[in-house]
Image: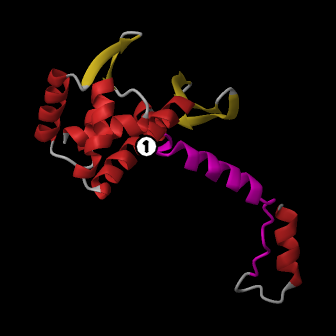
Amino acid sequence: MQILLAYFLNKINQLCTPNQLTEIATGEGIVNYFDYTAAVSTMLENGTLEITEIEGTEYYRLTEKGKAGVEVFKKQVEKSLRDKVYAAGLRLFARLKSDMDICFDIEPMGSGFSVGCKYKDGDMTLMDINLYAPDEDQANFIRSKIKMNPTDFYCRVIDYIIENEEYVPSVAESDDGAGDDSAVEEQYTLW
């Protein structure tokens, strides 16, 4: 387990908070939580892993001793298991990046709530939209649904806009007025 964690931290080449590493290792049932916590404790004790603080947030960092051991011992852990942990880490960091790219603002508005949603890619605002919700629970529901997959939401909005055409109602023939021109004429005058 220690080798697996060291391999992941070395390969990802990014600092992880203790909560992030716990979620990566145990969140998808890849490893047992108790085995994970025992491995982290051992790594901290033997100096292959250290905790560093940056701007008030604690991160796990692989030490030089840990990095040296990775290459020597990585053959002891199956490649499929190494790949699973690495993929879980990439998914978590992608989700965290996505969370940073979208922000919400829920405010009371008349008889309901306005759900402001701003989706950005770096410095560029891709979408800035306000949606109405009749109550705060529904406003929070809208936010949670968009937050589940903001990229998909954005793509669906763009697809709808691209495929949208002017609505042209069809003239429906009435059952009793089939063939009667006055019924069709009367229908047009109502519009």
Q: Residue at x 43, y 43 (%)?
A: 90
Residue farthest to the top? 56
Residue situated in front as seen by the camera: 28 or 44: 44
The residue carrying mark 1 is 90
Q: Within the magenta stretch, is there residue 163?
A: yes
Q: Residue at x 59, y 36 (%)?
A: 131
Instruction: Kindly tell me whether residue 113 is visible in this rendering.
Output: no
Q: Position of residue 70 (x, y in %)?
A: 30, 39
Q: Position of residue 130 (x, y in %)?
A: 62, 33
| Vertical relation: 167 (above or below) 153 | below
Crowdedness near tag 1: few (<14), some (14–19) or many (≥20) residues, C-alpha within 10 Å: some
Residue situated in front as seen by the camera: 41 or 145: 41
Please say which color scheme the image uses. secondary structure
45 lies left or right of 10 = left
Q: Quadrant of the N terminus?
A: top left
Q: Mark 1: which amino acid?
A: Leu
Q: Quadrant of the C terminus?
A: bottom right
| Vertical relation: 96 (above or below) 61 | below
Q: Residue at x 26, y 25 (%)?
A: 49
Mark 1 secondary-structure assignment = helix
Q: Within the magenta stretch, is there residue 126?
A: no
Instruction: Kindly tell me whether residue 150 is visible in this rendering.
Output: yes
**Residue 54, quarter of picture:** top left
Residue situated in front as seen by the camera: 157 or 113: 157
Q: Which span of residues is magenta-colored?
A: 145-173
63 lies left or right of 109 = left
Q: Position of residue 97 (x, y in %)?
A: 50, 34
Q: Residue at x 39, y 26 (%)?
A: 15
Q: Position of residue 81 (x, y in %)?
A: 28, 53
Q: Main secondary structure of the magenta part?
A: helix
32 lies left or right of 175 = left
